[in-house]
Protein backbone atom coordinates (compact mmCIF):
# COMPACT_ATOMS: atom_id res chain seq x y z
CA UNK A 1 0.00 0.00 0.00
CA UNK A 2 2.78 2.42 0.96
CA UNK A 3 4.75 1.50 -2.13
CA UNK A 4 1.70 2.22 -4.37
CA UNK A 5 1.20 5.70 -2.87
CA UNK A 6 4.85 6.61 -3.32
CA UNK A 7 4.67 5.59 -6.97
CA UNK A 8 1.60 7.80 -7.48
CA UNK A 9 3.36 10.73 -5.77
CA UNK A 10 6.40 10.22 -7.94
CA UNK A 11 4.26 10.13 -11.07
CA UNK A 12 2.47 13.34 -9.97
CA UNK A 13 5.74 15.06 -9.15
CA UNK A 14 7.07 14.08 -12.52
CA UNK A 15 4.10 15.63 -14.24
CA UNK A 16 4.53 18.92 -12.30
CA UNK A 17 8.21 19.01 -13.12
CA UNK A 18 7.51 18.37 -16.79
CA UNK A 19 4.87 21.10 -16.80
CA UNK A 20 7.28 23.63 -15.27
CA UNK A 21 9.97 22.74 -17.81
CA UNK A 22 7.43 23.16 -20.62
CA UNK A 23 6.33 26.58 -19.36
CA UNK A 24 9.93 27.80 -19.06
CA UNK A 25 10.74 26.63 -22.57
CA UNK A 26 7.64 28.34 -24.01
CA UNK A 27 8.35 31.60 -22.17
CA UNK A 28 11.97 31.61 -23.28
CA UNK A 29 10.94 30.93 -26.83
CA UNK A 30 8.36 33.72 -26.62
CA UNK A 31 10.96 36.22 -25.46
CA UNK A 32 13.30 35.25 -28.23
CA UNK A 33 10.45 35.50 -30.71
CA UNK A 34 9.44 38.96 -29.35
CA UNK A 35 12.97 40.27 -29.68
CA UNK A 36 13.32 38.90 -33.17
CA UNK A 37 9.89 40.29 -34.09
CA UNK A 38 10.89 43.77 -32.79
CA UNK A 39 13.97 43.78 -34.99
CA UNK A 40 11.94 42.69 -37.99
CA UNK A 41 9.31 45.43 -37.53
CA UNK A 42 9.35 48.25 -40.12
CA UNK A 43 11.01 51.50 -38.93
CA UNK A 44 8.61 53.99 -37.36
CA UNK A 45 8.60 57.44 -38.95
CA UNK A 46 9.37 60.09 -36.35
CA UNK A 47 10.46 63.70 -36.02
CA UNK A 48 13.28 64.60 -33.68
CA UNK A 49 14.77 67.66 -32.01
CA UNK A 50 18.18 68.17 -30.48
CA UNK A 51 18.57 68.40 -26.71
CA UNK A 52 20.42 71.57 -25.78
CA UNK A 53 21.92 73.27 -22.75
CA UNK A 54 19.70 76.16 -21.65
CA UNK A 55 19.61 78.62 -18.81
CA UNK A 56 16.32 77.82 -17.11
CA UNK A 57 14.74 79.30 -14.02
CA UNK A 58 11.64 78.42 -11.98
CA UNK A 59 8.66 80.46 -13.04
CA UNK A 60 5.40 81.80 -11.70
CA UNK A 61 2.34 82.35 -13.85
CA UNK A 62 0.56 85.69 -13.81
CA UNK A 63 -2.43 86.95 -15.74
CA UNK A 64 -2.28 89.74 -18.27
CA UNK A 65 -4.29 91.41 -21.01
CA UNK A 66 -3.52 92.40 -24.57
CA UNK A 67 -3.96 96.17 -24.85
CA UNK A 68 -3.63 98.67 -27.68
CA UNK A 69 -1.09 101.48 -27.61
CA UNK A 70 -3.78 103.77 -29.04
CA UNK A 71 -7.35 103.38 -27.85
CA UNK A 72 -9.02 106.75 -28.39
CA UNK A 73 -12.45 108.29 -28.13
CA UNK A 74 -12.43 110.75 -31.02
CA UNK A 75 -14.37 113.93 -30.22
CA UNK A 76 -15.65 116.84 -32.28
CA UNK A 77 -13.59 120.05 -32.39
CA UNK A 78 -16.43 122.12 -33.85
CA UNK A 79 -20.16 122.11 -33.30
CA UNK A 80 -22.77 121.19 -35.84
CA UNK A 81 -24.99 118.45 -37.19
CA UNK A 82 -23.31 115.07 -37.73
CA UNK A 83 -23.87 114.07 -41.35
CA UNK A 84 -21.80 110.84 -41.65
CA UNK A 85 -20.06 108.32 -39.41
CA UNK A 86 -17.92 105.24 -40.04
CA UNK A 87 -19.42 101.86 -39.24
CA UNK A 88 -18.36 99.61 -36.38
CA UNK A 89 -15.75 97.15 -37.56
CA UNK A 90 -14.41 99.35 -40.37
CA UNK A 91 -10.65 99.12 -40.86
CA UNK A 92 -9.22 102.58 -41.50
CA UNK A 93 -5.83 104.04 -42.27
CA UNK A 94 -4.41 107.20 -40.72
CA UNK A 95 -5.97 110.28 -42.33
CA UNK A 96 -9.11 108.54 -43.59
CA UNK A 97 -12.42 110.35 -42.95
CA UNK A 98 -14.35 108.65 -40.15
CA UNK A 99 -16.98 111.34 -39.43
CA UNK A 100 -18.35 114.52 -41.00
CA UNK A 101 -20.07 117.54 -39.47
CA UNK A 102 -22.26 119.78 -41.67
CA UNK A 103 -19.78 122.44 -42.90
CA UNK A 104 -22.23 125.06 -44.23
CA UNK A 105 -21.84 127.52 -41.36
CA UNK A 106 -18.05 127.08 -41.38
CA UNK A 107 -17.95 127.87 -45.11
CA UNK A 108 -19.92 131.08 -44.51
CA UNK A 109 -17.50 132.06 -41.76
CA UNK A 110 -14.56 131.51 -44.11
CA UNK A 111 -16.16 133.68 -46.79
CA UNK A 112 -16.81 136.53 -44.34
CA UNK A 113 -13.32 136.34 -42.88
CA UNK A 114 -11.75 136.36 -46.35
CA UNK A 115 -13.81 139.43 -47.32
CA UNK A 116 -12.73 141.23 -44.15
CA UNK A 117 -9.10 140.48 -44.92
CA UNK A 118 -9.46 141.88 -48.44
CA UNK A 119 -11.08 145.08 -47.07
CA UNK A 120 -8.35 145.61 -44.49
CA UNK A 121 -5.62 144.94 -47.05
CA UNK A 122 -7.02 147.84 -49.11
CA UNK A 123 -7.20 149.99 -46.01
CA UNK A 124 -3.61 149.18 -45.11
CA UNK A 125 -2.37 149.97 -48.63
CA UNK A 126 -4.13 153.36 -48.53
CA UNK A 127 -2.68 154.21 -45.11
CA UNK A 128 0.77 153.16 -46.26
CA UNK A 129 0.61 155.48 -49.31
CA UNK A 130 -0.80 158.31 -47.17
CA UNK A 131 2.15 158.04 -44.80
CA UNK A 132 4.63 158.17 -47.69
CA UNK A 133 3.04 161.38 -49.07
CA UNK A 134 3.01 162.97 -45.63
CA UNK A 135 6.68 162.24 -45.15
CA UNK A 136 7.47 163.82 -48.55
CA UNK A 137 5.60 166.96 -47.56
CA UNK A 138 7.34 167.09 -44.21
CA UNK A 139 10.73 167.07 -45.96
CA UNK A 140 9.61 170.23 -47.82
CA UNK A 141 8.33 171.78 -44.59
CA UNK A 142 4.75 171.57 -45.93
CA UNK A 143 3.50 169.12 -43.22
CA UNK A 144 3.78 169.32 -39.48
CA UNK A 145 5.28 166.63 -37.27
CA UNK A 146 1.83 166.09 -35.78
CA UNK A 147 0.40 165.22 -39.17
CA UNK A 148 3.26 162.78 -39.76
CA UNK A 149 2.63 161.08 -36.42
CA UNK A 150 -1.07 160.84 -37.14
CA UNK A 151 -0.47 159.24 -40.55
CA UNK A 152 1.97 156.73 -39.07
CA UNK A 153 -0.50 155.80 -36.29
CA UNK A 154 -3.31 155.24 -38.80
CA UNK A 155 -1.00 153.08 -40.91
CA UNK A 156 -0.02 150.98 -37.87
CA UNK A 157 -3.65 150.54 -36.82
CA UNK A 158 -4.55 149.28 -40.29
CA UNK A 159 -1.59 146.87 -40.17
CA UNK A 160 -2.70 145.41 -36.81
CA UNK A 161 -6.32 145.14 -37.92
CA UNK A 162 -5.18 143.28 -41.00
CA UNK A 163 -3.12 140.85 -38.88
CA UNK A 164 -6.15 140.21 -36.67
CA UNK A 165 -8.37 139.62 -39.69
CA UNK A 166 -5.91 137.17 -41.18
CA UNK A 167 -5.87 135.24 -37.88
CA UNK A 168 -9.67 135.12 -37.93
CA UNK A 169 -9.55 133.79 -41.50
CA UNK A 170 -7.06 131.10 -40.48
CA UNK A 171 -9.29 130.10 -37.59
CA UNK A 172 -12.35 129.90 -39.83
CA UNK A 173 -10.44 127.77 -42.32
CA UNK A 174 -9.29 125.53 -39.47
CA UNK A 175 -12.86 125.11 -38.23
CA UNK A 176 -13.93 124.16 -41.73
CA UNK A 177 -11.16 121.56 -41.94
CA UNK A 178 -12.02 120.17 -38.50
CA UNK A 179 -15.61 119.63 -39.58
CA UNK A 180 -14.15 116.62 -41.37
CA UNK A 181 -12.97 114.20 -38.66
CA UNK A 182 -10.09 111.98 -39.77
CA UNK A 183 -8.44 108.95 -38.18
CA UNK A 184 -5.39 109.93 -36.17
CA UNK A 185 -3.89 106.45 -36.64
CA UNK A 186 -4.58 103.19 -38.44
CA UNK A 187 -6.92 100.78 -36.70
CA UNK A 188 -10.53 99.68 -36.41
CA UNK A 189 -13.72 101.48 -35.48
CA UNK A 190 -15.06 99.62 -32.45
CA UNK A 191 -17.87 101.87 -31.24
CA UNK A 192 -20.12 104.67 -32.49
CA UNK A 193 -20.69 107.18 -29.69
CA UNK A 194 -23.09 109.40 -31.65
CA UNK A 195 -25.60 109.02 -34.46
CA UNK A 196 -26.01 110.70 -37.82
CA UNK A 197 -28.37 113.67 -37.52
CA UNK A 198 -27.40 114.58 -33.95
CA UNK A 199 -26.19 118.08 -33.10
CA UNK A 200 -22.68 117.71 -31.76
CA UNK A 201 -21.05 120.15 -29.33
CA UNK A 202 -17.35 120.89 -29.13
CA UNK A 203 -15.58 118.12 -27.20
CA UNK A 204 -18.38 115.58 -27.53
CA UNK A 205 -17.22 112.01 -28.33
CA UNK A 206 -18.41 110.65 -31.66
CA UNK A 207 -16.42 107.47 -32.30
CA UNK A 208 -14.01 105.06 -30.62
CA UNK A 209 -10.96 104.07 -32.65
CA UNK A 210 -8.51 101.34 -31.57
CA UNK A 211 -5.07 100.76 -33.04
CA UNK A 212 -5.10 97.04 -33.79
CA UNK A 213 -1.60 97.02 -35.29
CA UNK A 214 0.40 98.23 -32.31
CA UNK A 215 -0.41 96.12 -29.26
CA UNK A 216 1.23 95.31 -25.96
CA UNK A 217 0.57 92.89 -23.14
CA UNK A 218 0.00 94.54 -19.79
CA UNK A 219 0.41 92.51 -16.63
CA UNK A 220 0.77 93.22 -12.93
CA UNK A 221 3.64 91.39 -11.24
CA UNK A 222 4.93 91.20 -7.66
CA UNK A 223 7.71 93.67 -6.95
CA UNK A 224 9.93 90.77 -5.85
CA UNK A 225 10.08 89.50 -9.45
CA UNK A 226 11.57 92.68 -10.87
CA UNK A 227 15.09 91.53 -9.96
CA UNK A 228 14.69 88.62 -12.41
CA UNK A 229 12.63 90.27 -15.18
CA UNK A 230 14.63 92.61 -17.41
CA UNK A 231 13.74 94.53 -20.60
CA UNK A 232 14.58 92.56 -23.71
CA UNK A 233 14.24 89.09 -22.19
CA UNK A 234 11.74 86.70 -23.81
CA UNK A 235 8.93 85.19 -21.75
CA UNK A 236 6.27 82.64 -22.61
CA UNK A 237 2.71 83.86 -23.19
CA UNK A 238 -0.21 81.49 -23.65
CA UNK A 239 -3.94 81.70 -24.22
CA UNK A 240 -5.90 78.52 -24.71
CA UNK A 241 -3.85 76.20 -26.91
CA UNK A 242 -1.76 79.05 -28.38
CA UNK A 243 1.69 79.70 -26.93
CA UNK A 244 4.12 82.37 -28.09
CA UNK A 245 7.31 84.08 -26.98
CA UNK A 246 7.26 87.85 -26.38
CA UNK A 247 9.98 90.26 -25.34
CA UNK A 248 9.71 92.42 -22.23
CA UNK A 249 9.50 96.05 -23.38
CA UNK A 250 9.48 97.76 -20.02
CA UNK A 251 9.26 97.17 -16.31
CA UNK A 252 7.55 100.24 -14.85
CA UNK A 253 9.83 101.33 -11.98
CA UNK A 254 6.95 102.41 -9.73
CA UNK A 255 5.02 99.95 -7.57
CA UNK A 256 1.63 100.19 -5.91
CA UNK A 257 1.95 100.80 -2.18
CA UNK A 258 -1.12 98.69 -1.38
CA UNK A 259 -0.88 95.70 -3.73
CA UNK A 260 2.95 95.65 -3.89
CA UNK A 261 2.68 95.12 -7.64
CA UNK A 262 4.35 96.73 -10.63
CA UNK A 263 3.27 96.87 -14.25
CA UNK A 264 5.21 94.99 -16.91
CA UNK A 265 4.71 95.61 -20.61
CA UNK A 266 5.49 93.04 -23.32
CA UNK A 267 5.85 93.89 -26.99
CA UNK A 268 3.01 92.27 -28.96
CA UNK A 269 3.02 94.29 -32.18
CA UNK A 270 1.67 92.30 -35.15
CA UNK A 271 1.48 89.20 -32.94
CA UNK A 272 -2.03 88.18 -33.97
CA UNK A 273 -3.46 88.57 -30.45
CA UNK A 274 -6.81 90.35 -30.34
CA UNK A 275 -6.94 93.44 -28.15
CA UNK A 276 -8.55 92.45 -24.86
CA UNK A 277 -7.41 88.81 -25.00
CA UNK A 278 -6.67 87.41 -21.51
CA UNK A 279 -3.29 85.67 -21.43
CA UNK A 280 -1.09 83.78 -18.99
CA UNK A 281 2.56 84.81 -18.70
CA UNK A 282 5.38 82.75 -17.21
CA UNK A 283 7.85 84.97 -15.36
CA UNK A 284 11.14 83.82 -13.81
CA UNK A 285 11.05 83.72 -10.02
CA UNK A 286 14.68 82.81 -9.30
CA UNK A 287 18.14 82.79 -10.80
CA UNK A 288 18.43 80.66 -13.94
CA UNK A 289 20.43 77.41 -13.83
CA UNK A 290 22.02 75.65 -16.80
CA UNK A 291 20.49 72.26 -17.57
CA UNK A 292 19.88 69.91 -20.48
CA UNK A 293 16.57 70.90 -22.05
CA UNK A 294 14.28 69.04 -24.44
CA UNK A 295 11.11 70.23 -26.18
CA UNK A 296 7.94 69.75 -24.20
CA UNK A 297 6.49 67.74 -27.09
CA UNK A 298 9.02 64.99 -26.41
CA UNK A 299 7.36 63.99 -23.12
CA UNK A 300 5.31 60.79 -23.24
CA UNK A 301 2.88 59.98 -20.42
CA UNK A 302 1.60 56.48 -19.80
CA UNK A 303 -0.22 56.08 -16.56
CA UNK A 304 1.93 57.50 -13.79
CA UNK A 305 5.13 57.28 -15.83
CA UNK A 306 6.67 60.09 -17.87
CA UNK A 307 9.57 59.45 -20.20
CA UNK A 308 11.20 60.49 -23.46
CA UNK A 309 12.57 58.54 -26.41
CA UNK A 310 15.96 59.28 -27.87
CA UNK A 311 17.49 57.81 -31.02
CA UNK A 312 20.71 55.85 -30.51
CA UNK A 313 23.55 55.36 -33.00
CA UNK A 314 21.87 52.22 -34.43
CA UNK A 315 18.68 54.14 -35.26
CA UNK A 316 16.60 52.56 -32.51
CA UNK A 317 14.32 54.20 -29.96
CA UNK A 318 15.70 54.22 -26.42
CA UNK A 319 13.22 54.88 -23.61
CA UNK A 320 14.53 57.24 -20.89
CA UNK A 321 12.60 58.10 -17.70
CA UNK A 322 11.99 61.86 -17.52
CA UNK A 323 13.55 63.20 -14.33
CA UNK A 324 12.14 66.71 -14.69
CA UNK A 325 13.95 69.62 -13.05
CA UNK A 326 11.80 72.46 -14.36
CA UNK A 327 9.43 73.33 -17.18
CA UNK A 328 9.82 76.74 -18.80
CA UNK A 329 7.38 77.41 -21.61
CA UNK A 330 8.03 74.95 -24.43
CA UNK A 331 11.20 73.51 -22.85
CA UNK A 332 11.67 70.89 -20.14
CA UNK A 333 14.85 70.65 -18.07
CA UNK A 334 15.98 67.10 -17.27
CA UNK A 335 18.32 66.03 -14.48
CA UNK A 336 19.81 62.96 -16.19
CA UNK A 337 19.41 60.39 -18.94
CA UNK A 338 19.72 62.88 -21.82
CA UNK A 339 22.87 64.69 -22.92
CA UNK A 340 23.18 67.86 -24.94
CA UNK A 341 23.21 66.87 -28.60
CA UNK A 342 21.02 63.79 -28.20
CA UNK A 343 18.21 63.44 -30.70
CA UNK A 344 14.88 63.17 -28.87
CA UNK A 345 11.65 62.17 -30.59
CA UNK A 346 8.95 64.85 -30.61
CA UNK A 347 6.49 63.29 -33.10
CA UNK A 348 5.51 59.64 -33.25
CA UNK A 349 6.78 58.62 -29.80
CA UNK A 350 3.33 57.60 -28.55
CA UNK A 351 3.32 54.47 -30.74
CA UNK A 352 6.89 53.37 -30.08
CA UNK A 353 8.20 50.45 -28.10
CA UNK A 354 11.71 50.36 -26.57
CA UNK A 355 14.28 49.18 -29.09
CA UNK A 356 12.06 49.73 -32.11
CA UNK A 357 13.90 51.01 -35.19
CA UNK A 358 12.96 54.52 -36.33
CA UNK A 359 13.26 56.61 -39.46
CA UNK A 360 13.79 60.37 -39.01
CA UNK A 361 11.59 62.24 -41.46
CA UNK A 362 11.96 65.72 -42.92
CA UNK A 363 11.01 68.64 -40.71
CA UNK A 364 13.25 67.63 -37.86
CA UNK A 365 15.91 70.07 -36.77
CA UNK A 366 18.30 67.18 -36.37
CA UNK A 367 17.79 66.26 -40.04
CA UNK A 368 18.34 69.86 -41.08
CA UNK A 369 21.56 70.07 -39.09
CA UNK A 370 22.93 66.86 -40.58
Image: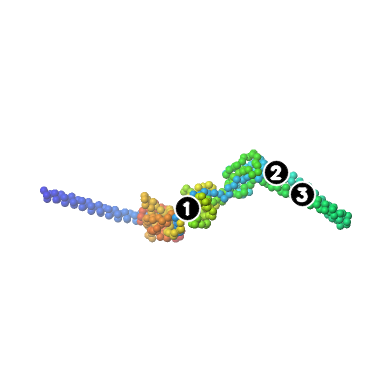
Gap in Å between the C-alphas at discs 2 and 1?
56 Å
Residue 63, given in percent of the width and then of the height, sits at 49, 49
Between circles 2 and 3, the one closer to the viewer is 3
Residue 102, given in percent of the width and then of the height, sits at 67, 42
Residue in view at x 33 percent, y 54 percent: 37
* Residue at mark 2: 106
* Residue at mark 1: 282
Which quadrant: the C terminus?
Answer: bottom left
* Residue at mark 3: 161
Ranked by sequence position, the earlier of labels 2 and 1 is 2
Q: Secondary structure at mark 1?
A: strand
Q: Is residue 103 visible?
A: yes
Residue 1, given in percent of the width and then of the height, sits at 11, 48
Residue 312, given in percent of the width and then of the height, sits at 38, 59
Q: Which class describes the residues within 10 Å of circle 1: few (<14), some (14-19), or many (20+)?
A: some
Residue nearest the viewer, comparing 259 with 177: 259
Amino acid sequence: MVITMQKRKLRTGGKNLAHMLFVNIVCSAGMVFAQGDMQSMPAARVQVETAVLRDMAPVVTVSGTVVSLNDSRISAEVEGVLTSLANVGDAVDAGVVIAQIDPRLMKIAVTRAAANVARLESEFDYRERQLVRTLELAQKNNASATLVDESRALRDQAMHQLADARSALEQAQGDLARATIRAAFSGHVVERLAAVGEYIDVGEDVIRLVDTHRAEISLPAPISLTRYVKPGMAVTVSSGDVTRQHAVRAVVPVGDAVSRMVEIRLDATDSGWLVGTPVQISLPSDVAVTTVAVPRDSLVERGSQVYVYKVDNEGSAVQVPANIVTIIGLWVGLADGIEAGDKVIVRGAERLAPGQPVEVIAGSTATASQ
